[in-house]
């Protein structure tokens, strides 16, 4: 397998370890030490993807995190699929499988390119908003094809075989970036004795020193890197994190680091020495006393016509591929630049024995050392000129170079065509200010370097900037600045700085960079061939100017209208050029234009890394009641309620769910049933202000609730909407037991604590979750009193133990609290015992209940029974948009309480007092055998045209064995005043179910059965 662009020698690759990989189904070869991008370039692969909007062929542009085009899909099998991986950041491993994320039928021959070529001028910024508005009925069709055309990769459909980690760390100094400034800073801080973490996103530490042609102390810079790392590795207080991107800078000097532990070893993490699979990636959660930002700078491309054709690359990236990977991505080079440092690519290219066709320098008379070095080697330098247009389609075939007036933005000569197969461009350097901006800090413009640098931390970020990010570029000054920053960080963290020596870099004369953010063309920007600013999102200079003409003047508005800086690129290459073009169109300066806000994450982070080990049972543990074993042994089917496994129903042989539920319902109505209700939330509330607190969080009054009594209550959010309900019992003058819905227990406890700690801290009241402490067994049905009497010493007579009261006593020889409350409308008792005793009490009840027809029942039966009585389930019959009055539960609102309760003001808003609000009612289908689907939308007129006017929806619907018909609860507009009227439920299959609006209480409307 021939690597046509691989140089015969050089680079930091290991030629003794050839690696085989595939790209778009074609097999290639690279070497250990390659990135995927380097290996693709070595094998002469030009087109790696298609552009977002126009489907234009795109090639590799950069060599690091700023790469906009080579965003690929990895994985040889479905479970190993990883979308949107930058080829420039993916280390090559044997067997790697990669493919382009778009292009049909192939990336080389993409039919969508015809749309971009023919209709490109019809797709300016905002055309989506303007074109696909009408007709409204076709939007779903438009959306389907827009999404299909716009995708970047796809998520796997099978379970991820890998594991991921989270680690919490503390340090005195965190150094972000391990280039020359970062290494110097780490050495300074570590020599002082500080705890230091050094993190860098590359496979190797060293940054630009790994491929620079500059020397330190007369030796290759990489040798000093090796010495510095050897010193750091010996220090016990230093932690080195390679392949670790600091993605977020958060409050209180808290930073998140995404480390790719085994991505370089294979598509699935290998097994460790102990036979356990290693973690693939890790998130380090770091709290640092001080942070040194040594994040460097990104080279800016020049913006000229057709600058997206494969073979247009950053000058620095070309040098990186030459010197670090021994890859020459072409044979005949043209360089277009406005600065001295870009000339290193010319010298590197010549050193590799390759041809430099010409250099176009926008400056009138550059005389820097590297510029003159190129002249001495016979390179043709066209001053006051630039590449104004690239020639070629799927690969650069030439460059058109013209004399320009950079300040006026005009072409001033006819120019010439120069044949070449590679155009390297450099428009200056943009410090990587992203992390410094994550907490809202605004970068500051420096005219002397034509770039933004980080603004002050202002106490929000305890950081020190060093090196290129600080606007310092010459190697010697970068090292000095880095050491200064490390020493300062250590001192501010409480350590005494130690003097140390640094290697000497060769002094080099450089001349100033000239501002050139858009290379002019013979034609106006709107008529010239496309000049791309953001290569990933197909944002052009003409598009930015159009956005300004259409009234988008804020940089944030321009960004959103054009998509400049969107996606995985986040504007690393295009932002400065883009905002400069917008500023010029508006006639304002670049600092007046400002920058967009940078937010975490700096580069994409996998969901696996975000989740870490917090998945499966570690994220959402399965909770079981003390009676779970009995339910299993007796054939229960289970459903998940919150995190709990609750018995759903208990089928007998030959029964389906409907038959089992019907049998259980009739058993409760005619004899007695038993339910495991242990999962209900239970909160113990104590303190001298407990009553007052309950008065404020519940809608009804609690001041006069006597000891031994219980009361039903509703809780509302501030907007007056119901968010939980339950029964609270008075255990003592200052002691209450609150019950909540199963799924709402944690939410309610958090709500109580929130209001106590932030709104009413003066109230002396304390909350303790006791859900797991008590097991609850509910006996319900006409025979429940007779059954319970068999195993308790409590007087169960109606006179001694009335409805909505509770007693303490013995049940099955165990201390118990028994509550006489009912969620079924039948005579019911809720027996609470310590969870450890639950199984013994349950088994005694089961044995004693045989003579009374005792039947265990599950949650589905409970739902039917409560619906027959019109009792609500919060979260099913409510959806966060209904008030107590909407539920016809105004009786549960204490409007005369002296102190306002949570939700009172919200309930009195004009909108909440409308008579046509959706209100809870009952529905009886005209055909009693038809069961309304839950969630079915309701209309008053089924003959109206689509889209119909929806007037409500079904919240609960069941077949009632006790009533011999189907019933439903629903929220209907103005429903409480529409009793006896008809509503209709049009279904997806074209059928319509007609129902009559009725009371929500279907069974025993007077409540006589629960009061016997």
Image (tube, helix red, strand yellow):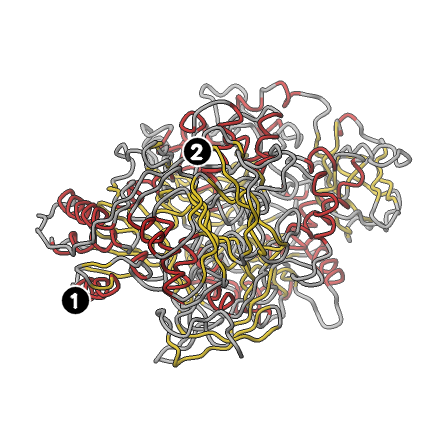
> From this viewpoint, is residue 622 visible?
no
Look at the numbered disc 1 and give the secondary structure of its residue. Answer: loop
Q: Is residue 485 above or below residue 855?
A: above
> From this viewpoint, is residue 697 visible?
yes
Q: Where is residue 884 in the image (x, y as percent from the top left)?
A: 61, 30
799 or 61, nearer to the observer? 61
How many numbered marks are there? Answer: 2
590 or 628, nearer to the observer? 590
Badge 1: residue crowd in 10 Å (few <14, some 14–19, many ≥20):
few
Q: Is residue 155 above or below residue 126?
A: below
314 or 986, nearer to the observer? 314
The reply to whether discs 2 and 1 touch (Cβ–Cβ < 8 Å) is no
Q: Which residue is drawn at 47% across and 31% down?
A: 697
Badge 2: residue crowd in 10 Å (few <14, some 14–19, many ≥20):
many
Residue 595 disc label: 2
Question: Counting residues from the N terminus, which is met first, the one under dot 2 or under dot 1?
Answer: 1
Look at the numbered disc 2 and give the secondary structure of its residue. Answer: loop
Which of the 4 quarters of the picture holds residue 815?
bottom left
Residue 234 disc label: 1
């Amino acid at each position: 397998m021939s690597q046509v662009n691989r140089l015969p020698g050089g680079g930091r690759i290991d030629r003794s370890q050839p690696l085989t990989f595939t790209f778009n189904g074609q097999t290639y070869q690279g070497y250990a030490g390659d990135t995927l991008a380097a290996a693709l370039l070595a094998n002469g692969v030009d087109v790696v993807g298609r552009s977002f909007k126009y489907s234009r062929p795109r090639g590799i542009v950069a060599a690091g995190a700023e790469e906009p085009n080579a965003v690929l899909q990895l994985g040889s099998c479905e479970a190993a699929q990883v979308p949107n991986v930058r080829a420039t950041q993916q280390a090559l491993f044997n067997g790697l499988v990669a493919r382009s994320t778009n292009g049909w039928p192939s990336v080389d021959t993409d039919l969508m390119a015809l749309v971009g070529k023919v209709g490109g001028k019809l797709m300016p910024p905002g055309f989506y908003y303007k074109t696909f508005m009408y007709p409204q009925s076709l939007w779903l069709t438009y959306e389907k094809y827009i999404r299909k055309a716009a995708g970047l990769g796809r998520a796997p459909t099978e379970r991820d075989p890998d594991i991921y980690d989270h680690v919490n760390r503390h340090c005195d100094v965190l150094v972000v970036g391990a280039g020359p400034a970062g290494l110097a800073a780490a050495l300074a801080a570590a020599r002082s004795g500080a705890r230091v973490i050094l993190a860098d996103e590359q496979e190797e530490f060293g940054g630009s020193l790994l491929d620079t042609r500059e020397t330190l102390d007369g030796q290759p810079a990489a040798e000093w890197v090796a010495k510095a790392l050897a010193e750091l590795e010996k220090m016990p207080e230093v932690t080195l994190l390679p392949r670790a991107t600091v993605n977020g800078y958060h409050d209180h000097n808290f930073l998140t680091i995404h480390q790719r532990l085994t991505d370089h070893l294979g598509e699935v993490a290998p097994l460790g020495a102990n036979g356990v699979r290693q973690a693939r990636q890790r998130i380090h959660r770091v709290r640092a006393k001080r942070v040194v930002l040594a994040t460097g700078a990104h080279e800016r491309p020049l913006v000229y016509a057709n600058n997206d054709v494969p073979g247009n690359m950053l000058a620095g990236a070309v040098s990186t591929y030459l010197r670090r990977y021994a890859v020459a991505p072409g044979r005949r080079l043209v360089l277009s630049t406005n600065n001295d440092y870009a000339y290193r690519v010319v010298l590197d290219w010549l050193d590799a024995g390759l041809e430099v066709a010409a250099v176009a320098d926008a400056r009138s008379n550059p005389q820097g050392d590297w510029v003159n070095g190129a002249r001495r080697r016979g390179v043709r330098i066209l001053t006051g000129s630039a590449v104004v247009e690239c020639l070629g389609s799927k690969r650069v075939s030439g460059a058109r170079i013209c004399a320009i007036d950079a300040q006026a933005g005009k072409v001033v000569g006819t120019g010439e065509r120069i044949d070449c197969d590679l155009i390297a461009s450099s428009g200056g350097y943009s410090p990587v200010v992203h992390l410094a901006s994550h907490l809202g800090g605004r970068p500051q413009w420096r005219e002397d370097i034509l770039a933004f640098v980080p603004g002050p931390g202002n106490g929000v970020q305890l950081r020190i900037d060093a090196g290129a990010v600080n606007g310092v570029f010459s190697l010697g000054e970068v090292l000095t600045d880095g050491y200064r920053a490390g020493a300062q960080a250590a001192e501010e963290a409480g350590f005494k700085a130690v003097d140390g020596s640094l290697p000497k870099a060769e002094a080099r004369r450089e001349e100033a960079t000239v501002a050139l953010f858009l290379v002019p063309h013979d034609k106006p920007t709107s008529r010239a061939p496309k000049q791309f600013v953001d290569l990933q999102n197909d944002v052009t200079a003409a598009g930015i100017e159009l956005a300004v003409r259409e009234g988008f003047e804020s940089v944030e508005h321009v960004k959103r209208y054009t998509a400049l800086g969107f996606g995985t690129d986040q504007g690393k290459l295009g932002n400065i050029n883009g905002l400069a073009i917008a500023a010029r169109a508006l006639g304002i300066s670049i600092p007046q234009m400002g920058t967009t806000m940078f937010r975490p994450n700096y580069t994409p982070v996998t969901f696996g890394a975000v989740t870490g080990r917090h998945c499966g049972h570690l994220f959402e543990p399965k909770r079981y009641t003390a009676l779970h074993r009995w339910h299993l042994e007796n054939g229960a089917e289970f459903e998940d309620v919150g995190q709990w496994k609750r018995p759903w129903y208990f089928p007998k042989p030959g029964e389906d769910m409907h038959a089992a539920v019907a049998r259980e319902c009739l058993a409760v109505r005619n004899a007695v049933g038993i339910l495991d209700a242990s999962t209900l939330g239970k909160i113990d509330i104590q303190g001298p202000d407990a009553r007052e607190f309950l008065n404020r969080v519940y809608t009804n009054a609690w001041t006069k609730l006597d000891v031994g009594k219980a009361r039903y209550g509703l809780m509302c959010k501030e907007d007056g909407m119901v968010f939980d309900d339950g029964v609270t019992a008075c255990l003592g003058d200052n002691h209450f037991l609150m019950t909540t819905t199963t799924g709402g227990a944690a939410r309610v406890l958090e709500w109580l604590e929130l209001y106590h700690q932030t709104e009413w801290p003066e109230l002396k009241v304390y909350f303790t979750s006791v859900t797991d402490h008590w097991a609850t067994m509910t006996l319900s049905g006409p025979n429940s009193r007779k059954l319970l009497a068999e195993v308790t010493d409590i007087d169960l007579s109606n006179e001694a133990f009335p409805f909505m009261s509770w007693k303490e006593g013995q049940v099955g020889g165990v201390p118990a609290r028994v509550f006489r409350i009912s969620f079924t409308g039948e005579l019911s008792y809720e027996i609470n015992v310590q969870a450890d005793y639950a199984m013994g009490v349950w088994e005694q009840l089961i044995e004693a209940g045989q003579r009374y027809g005792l039947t265990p029942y599950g949650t589905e039966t409970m739902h039917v029974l409560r619906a027959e009585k019109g009792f609500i389930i919060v979260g099913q019959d409510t959806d966060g948009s209904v008030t107590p009055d909407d539920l016809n539960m105004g009786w549960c609102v204490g409007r005369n309480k002296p102190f306002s309760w949570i939700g009172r003001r919200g309930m009195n808003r004009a909108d909440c007092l409308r008579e046509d609000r959706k209100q809870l009612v009952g529905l009886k289908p005209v055909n009693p055998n038809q069961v309304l689907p839950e969630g079915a939308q309701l209309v008053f007129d089924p003959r109206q045209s689509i889209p119909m006017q929806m007037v409500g929806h079904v919240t609960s619907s069941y077949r009632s064995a006790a009533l011999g018909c189907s019933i439903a609860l629903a929220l209907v507009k103005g429903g409480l005043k529409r009793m006896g009227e008809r509503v209709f439920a049009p279904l997806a299959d074209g059928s319509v179910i007609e129902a009559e609006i009725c009371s929500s209480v279907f069974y025993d409307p007077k409540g006589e059965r629960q009061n016997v």
